[in-house]
């Protein structure tokens, strides 16, 4: 198979990964997770959230600076008490490849590459520009090597070339905005996309290669996938959610039955995606809280959410799209206005 050509690979080291699972009616994202983190000025470099089993339960997972991981986990656990299960994994790295151009092949090849080297995937998310994967620091070097086997990066002939360019710039990738004093958060834009279905399934780490193969096959039909997240679930499994165009259910089920015949595949139809772009979204606390709080205050359910690099991607019911855009336009300030 011809390697997929990408422009770049970004590494953010020294993180901590926190995952919280709870009953669906007991874990509003704003009040249950984002609020205590924002109050304590803890930055989120990565964030995923998804309802599972028709809203019966949900999982939220996020990354912080490594030094803030234990405090973040304690805050979330204190907020929920015995209603939630909170797990902390210290010493993780975020690897981001870009651009993916909504091609299912990019996360598909990424999953196959990790599976081939038996590298544990702790989480995955997409922004409009990038696909990011969370792996342990101990497996970071192996992950970078296998990414170079799976993708081609014209600016770098080998991992050694990439390391040479990366060395000395780590501090720029970890830059934290110490003060956060905007009364209204400035953003670049709010982009909306409708006519989507939200798909979800739960797979074992050993099935990631087959999941990747299914996504690659869907991409060969030029189908676009504007959103994908993976969150840690029970028993070393991953809960995966992704959006594909509506009206393709028969083809999608046929492809997945070929590769993951014994895996339940759930579809939530008539959903829409909202993408919020802004400066330093991975470096400033409180932005995800502002979005989640605004939507929750209007009774707009977040079916899934992902945040990586410099974007928040929110999946909602298509019927709520107009109200959600109006609410977010009142919550954030577009640059130039």
Image (tube, grey):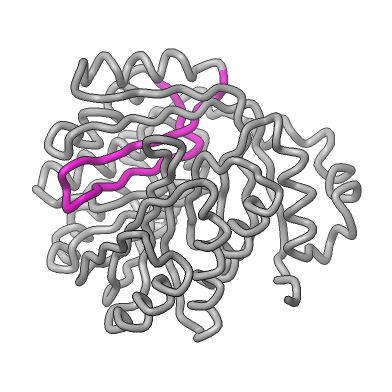
User: Is most of the magenta stretch helix, strand or loop?
Assistant: strand
Taking depth in this image into account, of 94 and 266 the one nearest to the observer is: 266
Q: x, y percentage for residue 38? A: 34, 25
The residue stretch that appears in magenta? 41-66
Instruction: Tell me which corner region of the image, top left, top right, bottom left or bottom right, holds residue 231.
Output: top left
Q: Position of residue 135 (x, y in %)?
A: 61, 38
When asked about the image quadrant of residue 101, the answer is bottom right
Seen in the picture, residue 165 relative to 243 is either above or below; the reply is: above
- The residue lying at 31 percent from left, 21 percent from top is 76
The N terminus: image quadrant:
bottom right
Magenta run includes residue 64: yes
The location of residue 238, given as percent across then percent down, is 43, 45
Horizontal side of 174 relative to 190 (left or right) equals: right
Q: Residue at x 41, y 35 (%)?
A: 235
Is 178 situated above or below 126?
above
**Residue 38 located left or right of residue 17:** left
Give the residue furthest to the front: 262
Q: Quadrant of residue 62?
A: top left
Q: Nearer the viewer, residue 196 or 190?
A: 196
Residue 213 in the image: above or below residue 75: below
Q: Residue 72: horizontal and vertical position, in percent?
A: 40, 19
Total numbered labels placed on residues in the image: 0
Residue 210 vs 249, above or below: the answer is above
For the C terminus, the image quarter is: bottom left
Q: Nearer the viewer, residue 217 or 124?
A: 217
As for residue 58 lying within the magenta part, the answer is: yes
Q: Identify the residue at image location x=50%, y=48%.
A: 124
């Amino acid at each position: 198979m011809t390697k997929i050509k990408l422009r770049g690979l970004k590494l953010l080291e020294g993180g901590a990964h926190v995952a919280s699972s709870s009953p669906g009616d007991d874990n509003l994202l704003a009040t249950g997770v984002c609020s205590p983190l924002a109050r304590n000025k803890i930055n989120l470099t990565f964030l995923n959230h998804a309802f599972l089993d028709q809203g019966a339960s949900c999982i939220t997972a996020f990354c912080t600076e490594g030094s803030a991981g234990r405090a973040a986990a304690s805050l979330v656990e204190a907020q929920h008490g015995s209603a939630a299960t909170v797990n902390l994994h210290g010493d993780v790295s975020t690897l981001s490849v870009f651009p993916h151009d909504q091609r299912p092949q990019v996360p598909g090849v990424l999953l196959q590459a990790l599976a081939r080297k038996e590298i544990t995937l702790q989480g995955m998310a997409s922004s409009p520009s990038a696909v990011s994967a969370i792996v342990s620091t101990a497996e970071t070097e192996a992950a970078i090597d296998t990414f170079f086997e799976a993708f081609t990066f014209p600016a770098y002939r080998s991992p050694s070339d990439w390391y040479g360019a990366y060395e000395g710039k780590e501090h720029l990738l970890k830059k934290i905005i110490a003060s956060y004093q905007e009364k209204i958060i400035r953003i670049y834009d709010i982009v909306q996309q409708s006519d989507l279905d939200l798909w979800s399934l739960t797979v074992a780490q050993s099935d990631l290669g087959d999941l990747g193969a299914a996504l690659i096959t869907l991409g060969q039909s030029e189908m676009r996938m504007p959103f994908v997240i993976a969150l840690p679930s029970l028993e070393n499994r991953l809960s995966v959610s992704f959006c594909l165009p509506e009206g393709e259910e028969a083809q999608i089920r046929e492809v997945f039955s070929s590769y993951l015949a014994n895996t339940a595949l759930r579809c939530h139809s008539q959903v829409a995606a909202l993408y919020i772009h802004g400066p330093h979204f991975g470096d400033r606390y409180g932005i995800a809280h502002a979005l989640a709080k605004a939507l929750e205050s209007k009774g707009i359910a977040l079916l899934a959410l992902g945040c990586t690099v410099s974007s928040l991607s929110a999946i909602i019911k298509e019927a709520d799209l107009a109200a959600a855009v109006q609410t977010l336009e009142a919550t954030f300030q577009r640059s130039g206005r």
